[in-house]
Amino acid sequence: MEEKELRQDLYECVSLLDVAHFNCCLGNENNAKQQCLEIVKILNRLSKTKAFKEGYHSIIKDISSYTLKFYDSIDKGNHFTYSEKIMWLSSKLYGEFYPPLTVYSHKLDSFHSYLLPIQKVIKEKTDILPLPESLNAHYEQVDIKNWTLDYNALSELYQDLLTNCSFVSSLLSIVELDRKDLLENLISPRQDSSIFKCQLYFNGSSRLVTIDNTLPFLNDSNRNLTINSNENLYWPALVEKAYLKVLGSGYKFEGSNMAIDTYMLTTWIPEIVPINNSKLYDCDDVWENYLSKSVLLGIGTGKLSVELSKKLNFISGHDYLVTSFDPITHTIVLKNPWIENDNSYKRTLTISDQDLHHFKYFYINWNPNAFFKYKFHMTFIYNVKDNTGTHMYQKPQFSLLNPTEDSQNVWLLLEKHLPLKNFSEQLINILIYETQLGDKVIVSNQCIRANKDSSTNSRLMLLKFTMKPKQAYTIVISSTIANTFTLNMYNNISRDFTFTKAKFKYPTTIPTFKDKWTSDNSGGNWSLSTYIDNPQYDIEVKTLPTNIMIGLFSEFKDKFVNFHIFQSDPSGKGHRIRLFDKSKLLVNEKYSMTYQFEDFKSLQPGFYKIVASAFDNNLNGAFELLAIHDSPPNNISITKIHPSLGLFLQKKEFDWNSSNRFKLYFKATQFSSRFTFHLKHYSHINKNTESLSDYRPFIRGSIFDAENSQPIQINEEWNDSLYGLFIDCDIQKPKTYILLVERFESGSGRCKVDIGCNRKFNIL
């Protein structure tokens, strides 16, 4: 067997293995297993050829061993963690497949040059990326014979027509390092071929981007659409092509920055620092590390007018590579990645502190191996809608504990996965709180914040913080748009130091009540007569005192909400409260914006009631009632109380018309009817809500037999409750009765009577 045939077979094996990984994560285990069997079949055939003995023995053996282990793990269902599954499922992008780098053994991974075909073929279907409509260009296959890594040759690379100064600056910064290993890791195989794999870091992993050997060329022009140099170098243009392919717009470049692009090329930790007051960030530390080649540096201009741009020799919205710094004169030497035919902009320029106000960002990429021994990462999906409708406890949260007796520096890097939707509108943030055990933070003011707010619309966000000895923290991820993310953590503690998904402080969660306020039950605050119309719930703590956290979370962005908890008794179970009794309140907090939260310590066995209210009435909006406690699941129950006065309900309204009594006739149609009457006075004609300041007459109500005027239930006490008068009465016989409604003095206004009953009845 010829080597080119062997390489083609190996290429098909690793490609099929990548698809098997994806299928396994997608839940198509049977397809994945079938693909593994196909791979083993090919490898078994290859092992019987001469090629097996000609340098490929270990490669075939390593892939076979890995494939068989992967097959067994599929059967056991334990090959991928949740994070790894999401990472693999993030491989599909713009209809293309970019698999993570797979390590088969300590000597072999999927980027190895032997796992790519070597034959040069004329392809009918080329790897064509979109081109700018304004340019007359075409694609051609190129012969790539110059694979030099020589500094002098690569340092002449420049940007021409394509506005990707960030990428070119990033590649030049690697060249300035003179790190050939970083350059070699960008593309494979390093020989003339039709197919190449470029290794770029995005979507939480080093990923392989397959491209062909076609590049765009302009018709009737000496200008270039690709990265170029004075030498006939094409391999950097292939890496550039892979980079543009991943971003999705091809040669219609839509922008990036040097820090992000350098991260994609090297995995060096990116930091984007705004330049404020013409001062650079922590210059001494940065330049010391720059001299030791532990950081890569760049700088970006802000928006400049055409006149100012020409005058200063700065390009508007442009990234430059930083090549040196003079600590005595505070001058910085920059390298311009762009060369124009007329050379109106210099390739190298020197700036001073006085020029910094023309620049907007300082780009730093830190070599992780120079500053940290260990890295841990987790990939996850951010499902919630947006910050305006997402409460703290619904956001992804992670638990972190410093296990040492010393302070520890930890860096967190949050990566937003491609593709980017509504890029400029999406803000991301990392919030860190000091917590007791790294438990989930329910509301923002519950715990001490350990870092400052620093949200960004960048695809990457770096947060540096110092952990106190033995202190636990909770990391909260915030985003205004749903997306997939990877959170990376760099540390010097140990390989086993990780963060985990945060859990609630208490182990038992009562199923969340998803409810809503409507025009029927949005009663407003307790100073309004409709307060008792709000949604209500029974709480029963059965035998053991319990610690319980209760939260009310609304969908409102700008409305105040609250919940009140009242002590009750067994006879009140299933019945709504009829007045706001402050003596029975457990807490009486002020209304707060969008949510209310309480952490009750040692709530004693007994019966309680919750009333969920907004400060304003007549609102429409959803809310959730969350309860978490530390007692056994069956020790606490929460049930919603039905809002109706009875199974059957009728209403009657009348005007007082300067009288002080009114007779309402009604007929019970069945035996053993249990009635509840709710009498409400209104002073206003077109207003169905009374407030504390409104006048209310004392009223009372009694029930009589309509046939003989015999009293059924006499109520002698007068009542001027804001929430109305309630009368409960059991009527044994089906016949006609009178509800006599009286007020203490004659007057005006109207009275509304709601009647509920467990059996059918009629108002006459």
Image: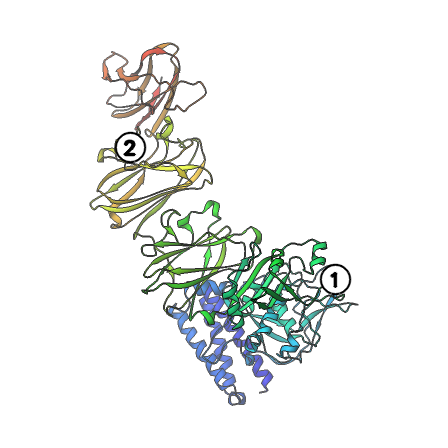
Q: Residue furthest left?
A: 543
Classify residue 191 by image quadrant: bottom right
Give me the C-alpha separation between circle 2 and circle 1. Answer: 76 Å
Res 608 seen here: yes
Residue visible at 65% across and 69% down in the picture:
127
Colour mode of the rendering: rainbow
- Percent x, y for residue 540? 25, 41
- The quadrant in which the C terminus is found is top left
Image spot of residue 278 (x, y percent) = 58, 56
Residue 708 image offset from top left, x and y in percent: 24, 11
Vertical position of residue 35 compared to residue 351: above or below: below
Q: In terms of depth relative to the viewer, which is nearer, 326 or 258?
A: 326
Q: Quadrant of the N terminus?
A: bottom right
User: In the rendered structure, which amino acid carries the disc numbered 2?
Assistant: His
The outermost residue toward the right is 220
For residue 420, what is the image quadrant? bottom right
Pick whichever of labels 2 and 1 is earlier in the sequence. 1
Local packing at callout 2 (Cα closer than 10 Å; few below 14, some 14-19, many 20+) is: some
> Which residue in the structure is indicated by mark 2?
575
Which residue does the numbered mark 1 point to in the structure image?
A: 135
Q: Residue at x 24, y 16 (%)?
A: 716
Q: Residues within 10 Å of mark 1 (few under 14, many from 20)?
A: few
Label 2 element class: loop
Element class at badge 1? loop
Q: Is residue 122 above or below residue 481?
A: below
Residue 312 % position (x, y): 69, 59
The answer to whether marks 2 and 1 mark residues whose Cβ atoms lie closer than 8 Å is: no
Specify the amino acid type for callout 1.
Leu
Q: Tell which of 730 and 201 is nearer to you.
A: 201
Q: Nearer the viewer, mark 2 or mark 1?
A: 1
How many marks overall?
Answer: 2
Nearer to the camera, 690 or 229 = 229
